[in-house]
Image: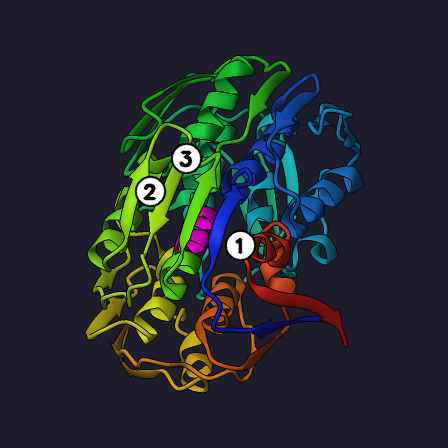
């Protein structure tokens, strides 16, 4: 088991290269199941969730090769096993994304109910109802989803609430369905656009990705394709806050500001000076203490729930009082008790965290509880006086590529050690 040791109080300055998006790469890897040929992915991040997905595809008969140029060639065209086993999916919510592609191509699937971060219930009922609307027969027993469909039939899908993974699952399944499928109240995240763009390169007929209505005209088969995964906007936002919380300056390379408007707006409100071009973002805090900002998480293009914990860390040392309201997940304030161990002043009222910024946090021994909570504790440790120890950092490795090495490049005193 690894832990991070951070000696805080250093102003961060420098340049960071942003990795490819975890939340785009995962569904694209599962989309490889639909293809009759290999797909080649560039800018795939080196994360434990990516490794878990590749192991899952291999367990079902897929193959992959890491090319000399760093790209990933994935061949999931001829699966020999149509089961996603519990032991491989228990740590990763995105494993549910194997259901739609396997069912669409092979007519049957057995998928373990997924695990992942303990941030809320995140039921799969929306996935299952939509697949039933496409003609699938679904049964859930003994912790597994059993799905069959001789041929999926296109239909109008109306999601009761906006859901990213269900939108992705049905988007993929519908590419090989007979007829036309229209997804209403679809999620609009940039990662869905990236998935759709890759599927279109594979021969899918998709329009409307990035809007609330997506139309898919089913085709008989999909081919291979080459695709570059879009930059990770959540990783980018986390490093922007790393500079902001320490009063420093950071330049992000391979970053796209257009997918980060809500994040950038709140950082500007906090007092950061931000400039950007097509592929980079620069934040300069000029040594100033940030101002507290009110946040309410919502679906894209509004403020992302995956940045809520990081802004709680920023608000903990900011000037003033602020509220952070979590409207997506019901159990996503597990970082608050850990931040209070460092001297942060928070009170919880239902799904809202109320902060009163303190001038100084102090280092403490902390326990990471989920992916983004882990990031918030790292950020707080960077700003704190003294030494912070964060345990169970395997959560971080699910979504951040060598986070301690990138922070060292910015001047952080941080190291990973094994117990």
Q: Position of residue 409 (x, y in %)?
A: 58, 52
Q: Quadrant of residue 376?
A: bottom left
Mark nearer the viewer, 3 or 1: 1
In this view, the residue in front, 376 or 275, is: 275
Residue at image position (58%, 30%) is: 31
At numbered mark 2, what does the secondary structure look like: helix, strand or loop? helix
**Which residue position holds label 3?**
280
Asked whether residue 188 appears in the rendered view, the answer is no
The colour scheme applied to this rendered structure is rainbow
Q: Are marks 3 and 1 in contact (CB under 8 Å)?
A: no
Query: Residue farthest to the front?
Result: 286
Residue identified by numbered label 2? 260
> Counting other residues with Cα less than 10 Å from the Cα at mark 3, is it few (<14), some (14-19), or many (20 or more)?
some
Is residue 146 at least partly visible in the picture? yes
The quadrant holding residue 78 is top right
How would you rate the neighbour count of disc 1 (Cα within 10 Å): few for under 14, some for 14-19, many for 20 or more? many
Disc 3 versus disc 1: distance between alpha carbons?
Answer: 16 Å
Front position among marks 2 and 1: 1
Mark 2 neighbour density, 10 Å: few (under 14) some (14–19) many (20 or more):
many
The percent position of residue 225, horizontal first and vertical second, equals 61, 16
For residue 332, above or below residue 90:
below
- Contact between marks 2 and 1 (CB within 8 A): the answer is no
Nearer to me, 100 or 70: 70
Closer to the N terminus: mark 3 or mark 1? 3
As for residue 332 lying within the magenta part, the answer is: no
Q: Which mark is residue 410?
A: 1
Say the numbered circle drawn on residue 163.
none
* Residue 238 magenta-highlighted: yes
Mark 2 or mark 3, earlier in chain:
2
Q: Residue 53: where, in percent of width, then height? A: 67, 44
**Label 1 SS:** loop
User: Which stretch is magenta?
Assistant: 234-240
């Amino acid at each position: 088991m690894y832990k991070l040791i951070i000696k805080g109080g250093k102003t961060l300055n420098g340049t960071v290269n942003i990795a490819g998006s975890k939340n785009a790469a995962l569904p694209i890897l599962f989309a490889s199941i639909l293809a009759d040929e290999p797909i080649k992915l560039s800018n795939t991040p080196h994360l434990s969730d990516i490794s878990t997905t590749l192991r899952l595809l291999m367990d079902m008969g897929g193959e992959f090769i890491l090319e000399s140029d760093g790209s990933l060639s994935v061949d999931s065209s001829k699966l020999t096993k149509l089961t996603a086993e519990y032991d491989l999916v228990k740590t990763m919510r995105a494993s549910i994304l194997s259901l739609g592609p396997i069912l669409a191509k092979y007519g049957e699937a057995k998928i373990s109910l997924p695990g992942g971060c303990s941030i809320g219930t995140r039921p799969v009922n929306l996935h299952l109802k939509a697949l039933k609307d496409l003609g699938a027969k679904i049964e859930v027993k003994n912790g597994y989803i059993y799905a069959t469909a001789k041929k999926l039939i296109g239909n109008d899908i109306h999601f009761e609430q906006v859901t990213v993974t269900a939108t992705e699952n049905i988007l993929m399944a519908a590419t090989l369905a007979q007829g036309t499928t229209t997804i209403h109240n679809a999620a609009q995240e940039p990662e869905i656009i990236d998935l759709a763009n890759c599927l279109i390169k594979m021969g899918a007929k998709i329009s409307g990705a990035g809007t609330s209505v997506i139309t898919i005209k089913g085709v008989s088969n999909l081919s291979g394709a080459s695709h570059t995964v879009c930059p990770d906007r959540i990783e980018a936002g986390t490093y922007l806050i790393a500079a902001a919380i320490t009063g420093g300056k950071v330049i992000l390379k391979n970053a796209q500001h257009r997918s980060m408007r809500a994040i950038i707006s709140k950082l500007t409100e906090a007092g950061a000076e931000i400039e950007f071009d097509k592929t980079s973002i620069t934040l300069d805090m000029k040594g100033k203490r940030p101002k507290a900002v009110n946040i309410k998480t919502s679906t894209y293009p509004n403020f992302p729930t995956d940045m809520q914990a990081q802004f709680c860390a920023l608000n903990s040392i900011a000037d003033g009082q602020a509220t952070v309201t979590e409207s997506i997940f019901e159990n996503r304030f597990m970082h608050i008790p850990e931040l209070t161990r460092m001297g942060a002043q928070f009170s919880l009222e239902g799904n809202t965290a109320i902060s009163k910024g303190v001038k100084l946090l102090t280092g403490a021994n902390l326990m990471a509880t989920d992916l983004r909570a882990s990031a918030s504790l790292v950020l707080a440790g960077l700003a704190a006086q003294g030494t912070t120890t964060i345990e169970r950092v395997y959560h971080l490795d699910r979504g951040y590529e060598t986070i301690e090495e990138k922070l060292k490049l910015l001047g952080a005193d941080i190291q990973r050690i094994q117990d």
